[in-house]
Image (cartoon, grey):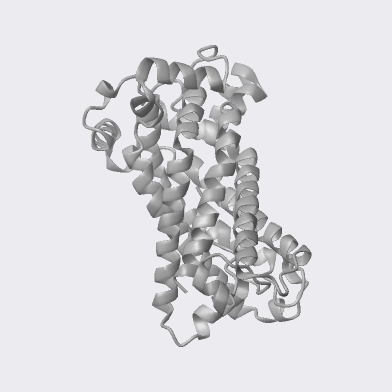
Amino acid sequence: MHGSSQEALSPAASRTGIGTNNCSHLEHHQRGITASAPQASAATRELFAGFAAGAANVTSGYPFDTVKVRLQSAPPGAYRGALDCAVKVVRYEGLRRGLFRGLSSPLVGGTLETGVNYLVYSRVLAMLASSAPSAVAGGGAGGAAGPGVTPLSHVAVAGAVAGVALSFILGPTELVKCRMQVARSSARYPGGPFQVLQEAVAAEGWVRGLTRGLGATLAREVPGNAVFFTAYEAARQALRQTSDLQGATTRRADLQGALAAILCGGAAGTLMWALVLPIDVAKTRLQTASPGSPWDVGLMQQWAMLWREGGLRSLYAGLTPTLVRAFPANACQWLAWEAIMRGLG
């Protein structure tokens, strides 16, 4: 689901794609403000790279997400676990129509959401850098590790602000995704995502129908996005302190940069989902509930009902497929972002 530690490149590395360097995340954003290229050019690159990163995330992780949603929305005892759920879905519904049902909506939404997420995050980070340059020049402030290093407090604020923006995209797209994923047959929504939207609007009106679960989405994305970006940047800063690329070949620099993006991105995504999963479970129940049903209640009431139903087991329904999905999906996302940002110069 989910800005970058975009680093400066040597001329050799910039030609090949993913090289690494010890320049800080913040320097990229400062260059976006002071370089001769128009500001819109930097924003366009960030948006385009975010689109590609979102597509990589959604495509690589969608089957795991389908299993997660099925586990979260199923009545107690329907499945013995994630593997049992996946096997039954494939056996009775097929691979494409089972595990990949409803992919079009999150692919469009995830691509747009991730592009907006990275764009807003990068622009807010650049604004914070220009308004408080001493926090970077001096080092140590706001969690920064040293001179020229992005303060982690800036990263957290930028991530949280971006989380607000992306929630308004995620709300309706995840509403469609979740309802299509819990449908036991493709015959339920022969008209696809548009039918889901039409039924939601017909049942509850434009505002309520399209914003069902928006509050829970905001509750998940604002803190979750702050954790996601902060964890990634903190991990990249730690790796920079331990890596030595002086005299390294371009190929070695490329491989180390790719490995760093994979490890840090996967770890950041896994940490975020481990923390926000109870919110996500409640959001799924709310978005798949029929109007007026017992599950058509607010976030706190959802949690109370989940706790009575099965305690922590219910609050963390879908934990296994969520974490199994989180690492590769977010590793692919960050790898795509870093590579494309460097490729676009």
Farthest left residue in view? 191
Q: Quadrant of residue 198?
A: top left
Residue positioned 57% across, 14% down in the render: 80
Residue positioned 49% across, 61% down in the render: 118
Q: Position of residue 197 (x, y in %)?
A: 27, 37
Q: Position of residue 282 (x, y in %)?
A: 52, 31
Residue positioned 76% across, 75% down in the render: 139
Taking depth in this image into account, of 251 and 315 the one nearest to the observer is: 251
Q: Position of residue 283 (x, y in %)?
A: 49, 34
Taking depth in this image into account, of 330 and 181 the one nearest to the observer is: 330
Farthest top residue in view? 77
Q: Quadrant of residue 10?
A: bottom right
Q: How many marks?
A: 0
Give above or below for 139 relative to 56.
Answer: below
Residue positioned 34% across, 48% down in the render: 108
Residue 127 visible in image: no
Q: Is residue 338 left or right of residue 172?
A: right
Taking depth in this image into account, of 239 and 228 the one nearest to the observer is: 239
Q: Is residue 265 left or right of residue 93?
A: right
Q: Position of residue 225 (x, y in %)?
A: 57, 52
